[in-house]
Amino acid sequence: MSWTTVISENPFYEFTAIIAAAALLGAVGQLLRQPLIVMFIALGILLGPSGLNIVKSKDSIHLLAEIGIVILLFIVGLKLDLRIIKTLGKVALLTGLGQVFFTSVIGYFIGILLGFSALHSFYIAVALTFSSTIIIVKLLSDKKEIDSLHGQIAIGFLIVQDIVVIMVMIILSAISQSGGETLMADVLRILVIGVMLVAFTLFSMRFIIPKLSAFLAKSQELLTLFAIAWAVAFAAFCEVIGFSGEVGAFLAGVSLATSHFKETISSRLVSLRDFLLLFFFVHLGATLNMTVIGAQVPAALIFSVFVLVGNPIIVLIIMGYMGYRKRTSFLAGLTVAQISEFSLIFAGLGLAVGHITEETVGLITLVGLITIGLSTYLIIYAADIYRYLSPVLGIFERKIAHREDAQQNTTTKNYDVIIIGLGRFGNRLAQMLNEHPHISYLGVDFDPTILKKWEQEGKNFIYGDIEDPEFLTQIPYQKARFIISTVPDLTITKHLLASLKQENYTGEIFVTATNDRDYHLLQSLGAQNILRPHKMAATNFYNDYMVKAIEHYNNQ
């Protein structure tokens, strides 16, 4: 009996092998600077039927994967500020629907030109339209870009896509079962259910969650358990009534988005989310049918190029027409440069009802494998790619005031102080400057939620992303006496210092370092004023409190 047989016959050994292999392959990936998502999908292929054939407990792995997906989208909903829906709802809806429409139409004609039948071309085209919410949210979370403008827009149109794919699959199932009457009834039913779910979410936010969470928060363990139970129950309920568990998990998070305890819940669930999502990627790799893929390589490469290049261009055109800057449009567009796990489910449904063949399913599977792998790299290195392509992307940008410029509240042209990064440190600095009315300051950030709060408080702010190569052209920095960056990223700080030096800025520059290594590197670059938030907080605490406490103790 081989060692692979011994492992696969015992679920505990099997899961031990999966976790150990994931840790080993993840370490190799980190050493080679490869994304963990790609390594974990490769792990699924390696351990699946096409490789060592260790993965046997597919139902158990799929269950863990589903729970991981639920927690992932629950956390996204948890961090959603409903106030930004008014601002971003329109672009999310139009971009989501527009991308689905144009991708499906162009994809259909590509299929026809490649010799596929009309029905097969339809299935392929529809499969190409849907992007993976799970993978994109994971990548944006890892890059800390969920709260950025392009991140919020991307999440919005991915949710729109999820709703569209649910509708398409419901329509397809109804057509295969009977006819028009069932189809109309199912569509009407799903619309009514959708409205009821949104209504229940709003009702929960207002009347159920505040009192219940306040009671459960007496124990953080119980609060966390409740959050998981609420997310899983909401997702399961949605699946029972014919909706998507993903949408249900997202709405469960939204219902807790106004809770005072959402940060506590979110921080305690992140590690669990990352662990369980391992099984999603392993399951995705293990279920890929590699035996029917070989003959589909040429067509798969053509469709993959369309998804990797065409889908982002479609988003660039739509968002550019709506007035967004090319960088915002480009970064949001890269999130649709792959097809979704829903695409594989959709293809499987087409196979089950006899509309397409196993070869067509293999084609869609191969496109998924190629685009998920390559788009992961595109998103991770998006800033570098943008700097390279920036000169030619201007054709997608309107020659009028940009929509981002509307997200600003400025009363004077020049400012004494410009604060870049309005997190805890930057916001506290602004509060202290409020005590000196003769000093004018401007806040700069890319988080729509933070900027909305500053607008309500009547502070001067402007939308700006320090990673944007054209960042300095968007802010009135020339006559500012002080520029203070609270962003701790060393690469970004180096770029800021170099850009200001190139522009011959003569004021004082303050930058931030969170560790000794970055501090010494910034010193070597000539930085004169380096902020150390944690060290400064400890020093202030010692000077303001500990010295007095020690003196009081010694005098007793």
Image (spheres, rainbow, N blue to C red):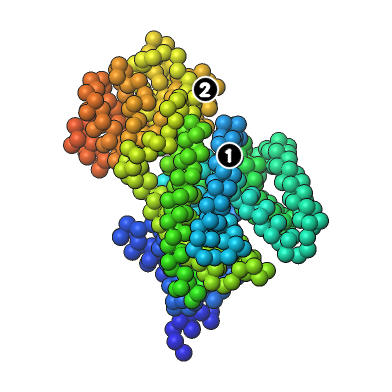
Q: Identity of the amino acid at label 1?
A: Leu
Give me the residue at 56% from left, 52% from top.
104
Residue 388, horizontal then vertical, whole percent: 31, 43
Which residue is denoted by mark 1 in the rendering? 94
**For residue 455, which numbered disc appears in the image?**
2
Give me the residue at 49% from left, 37% from top.
319
**Horizontal relation, residue 153 to residue 31: left or right:** right
The span from disc 1 to disc 2 (Cα, nearest Å) is 26 Å
Residue 273 in view in this figure:
no
Q: Secondary structure at mark 1?
A: helix
| Label 2 packing within 10 angstroms: few (<14), some (14-19), many (20+) | some
- Residue sitting farthest toward the bottom: 1
**Horizontal relation, residue 381 to residue 518: left or right:** right
Give me the residue at 65% from left, 47% from top.
252
Of 37 and 402, which appears nearest the observer?
A: 402
Residue 227, horizontal then vertical, whole percent: 62, 49
Dot 1 or dot 2: first in sequence order is 1
Give me the residue at 35% from left, 20% from top.
476
